[in-house]
Image (spheres, rainbow, N blue to C red):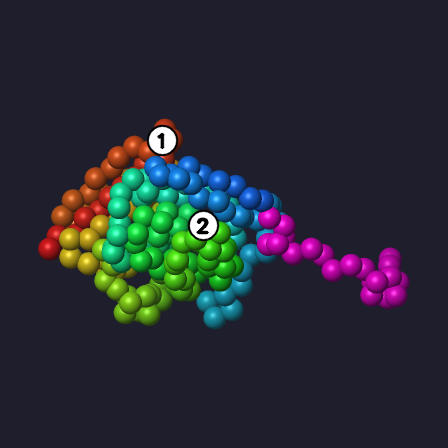
Amino acid sequence: MPTPAELARRPEPADPRLDLLAGTIDLHHGRIRFVHPREPAALLYEDDVAADQAYPPYWAELWPSGIELAHAVSARDWTGTRAVELGCGLGLPAVAAALAGARVLATDRSADALAFAAVNAEQNGASIETARCAWDDPDDLVARGPFQLVLASDVLYGQRNVDEMHALLPRLVADGGQVWISDPERPLTAEFLAAARPHWASVQTSPTRLPKVWLHRLTRGG
Ligand SMILES: C[S@@+](CC[C@H](N)C(=O)[O-])C[C@H]1O[C@@H](n2cnc3c(N)ncnc32)[C@H](O)[C@@H]1O
């Protein structure tokens, strides 16, 4: 057993959020430089005391769907488009959209995610806004809409998420606007798309550069 004096001398454990790796991803035009925590698994769950829940730090992972959505977004000129990213994590699609001219609001339930998204935007000379938003409490975000483009990557991984997306997306998208969701064949995604079809003017799926990651585009009539 350490003595009290030894305990007092013990160095503070390093914060794994600050142990960073740097990376780059290629876009259609140029590239994004970004940082992310080296060991997402070392991060603590985030407590939501009001909801009596703790959330895994999924925001800190470099998910293939995020990379592919950023790449797909970068194929177009989004000058003047109002865009929002839901569950932005490291914020790569948000940064890609901003570099392509969109006015982007990056959102997540995690304040740490928003800090990383903001740093990653800054590193690339992109300007984004950030806002904390949980999908089951979206009124402040809805009040900032509607948006012509809603981005989300790898968010359909639980029934609760799927239900919240069904309720939230129509409240965020402007008439004629689109939702772009990239997804790595999560088990609930087919069901999500089938349930969405009657409510959207079109639901289209296209491949990305990765065999198991797809881009789903929902267009609102109007
Ligand atoms: C699997 S990660 C994907 C992160 C990022 N979009 C990507 O592809 O790299 C899911 C993200 O959604 C966020 N998230 C999950 N549930 C949420 C909720 N109910 N409200 C807001 N954000 C949520 C998490 O914090 C996390 O950043």
Q: Is residue 16 magenta?
A: yes
Q: Quadrant of the C terminus?
A: bottom left
Q: Report the residue that reaches farthest toward the top.
A: 211
Q: Front-most of 71 and 7?
A: 71
Q: Residue at x 44, y 44 (%)?
A: 32
> The N terminus appears in which quarter of the rendering?
bottom right
Check residue 82 in the rendering and tell me which mark sits there, or answer none: none
Q: State left or right for residue 87 relative to residue 189.
A: right
Q: Are marks 2 and 1 in contact (CB under 8 Å)?
A: no
Horizontal arrangement in the rendering, residue 107 relative to residue 167 (left or right): right
Left or right: 17 as drawn, with respect to 164: right
| Residue indicated by mark 2 | 124
Q: Position of residue 208 (x, y in %)?
A: 33, 33
Mark 1 highlights which residue? 209
Instruction: Of the two numbered discs 2 and 1 on the same chain, state the one appearing first in sequence.
Output: 2
Is residue 89 in view from this perspective?
A: no
> Callout 1: 10 Å neighbours few (<14), some, many (20+)?
few
5 within the magenta span? yes
Seen as rendered, the residue at the extreme left is 222
The residue segment tinted magenta is 1-20
Q: Residue at x 40, y 43 (%)?
A: 66
